Image (tube, helix red, strand yellow):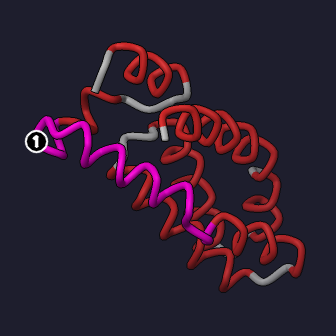
């Protein structure tokens, strides 16, 4: 992975060095997983569940995204999804929904970086 890609991903909120550690230094493999993240439908499921006020689907999608973001070292998104999952597990659907603006912003930033390198 070249320096420009590393910078773009880092600027997008991805701890590239940490992620590469999980991928045993294989930048190509990391990029393939980032593409899979971009193609994943859980974010759209989460947004639809928020609109439909479906806490169960919100929890499933948010929990899935939390795990993926953790594995890909998307630190800010991981933290936001972690907070959202905790709110949902506590029965606070409104608190979970209130995090969506921050989540949308962080997701857009990550996706912009991911789309630039793929």
Residue annotated with mark 1: 24
* Residue at the right extreme, as displayed: 51
Query: Where is residue 53 drawn, in percent x and y?
Result: 85, 79
In the rendered picture of this protein, how many numbered marks are placed on residues?
Answer: 1
Q: Is residue 59 left or right of residue 97?
A: left
Q: Is residue 79 left or right of residue 22?
A: right
Q: Nearer the viewer, residue 76 or 21?
A: 21
38 to 113, vertically: above or below? below
Q: Quadrant of residue 59?
A: bottom right
46 to 113, vertically: above or below? below
The quadrant in which the N terminus is found is top left
The crowd level at tag 1 (other Cα within 10 Å; few <14, some 14-19, many 20+) is: few
Q: Nearer the viewer, residue 57 or 22?
A: 22
106 to 1, vertically: above or below? below
Q: Is residue 15 left or right of residue 117?
A: left
Question: Is residue 36 inside the magenta stretch?
Answer: yes
Q: Which residues are magenta?
A: 21-42
Q: Quadrant of residue 23?
A: top left
* Residue at the left extreme, as displayed: 24
**Residue for point 35% across, 52% down:** 32
Considering the numbered disc 1 on the image, is that residue within a helix, a strand or a loop? loop
Query: Where is residue 17 drawn, in percent x and y?
Result: 25, 26
**Residue for point 36% across, 44% down:** 31
**Residue for point 51% across, 62% down:** 65
Q: Nearer the viewer, residue 92 or 28?
A: 28
Query: Where is residue 67 drawn, in percent x and y?
Result: 40, 61
Query: Where is residue 62 drawn, in percent x and y?
Result: 58, 66
Q: How would you classify the magenta stretch by its main secondary structure?
A: helix
**Residue for point 59% across, 73% down:** 61
């Amino acid at each position: 992975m070249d320096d420009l890609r590393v910078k773009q991903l880092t600027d997008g909120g991805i701890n590239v060095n940490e992620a590469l550690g999980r991928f045993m230094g294989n930048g190509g493999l990391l990029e393939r997983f980032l593409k899979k993240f971009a193609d994943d439908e859980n974010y759209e499921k989460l947004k639809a569940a928020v609109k439909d006020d479906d806490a169960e689907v919100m929890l499933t999608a948010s929990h899935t995204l939390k795990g993926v973001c953790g594995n890909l070292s998307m630190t800010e998104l991981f933290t936001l999804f972690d907070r959202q999952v905790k709110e949902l597990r506590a029965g606070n659907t409104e608190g979970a929904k209130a995090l969506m603006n921050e989540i949308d912003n962080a997701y857009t930033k990550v996706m912009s970086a991911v789309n630039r390198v793929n």
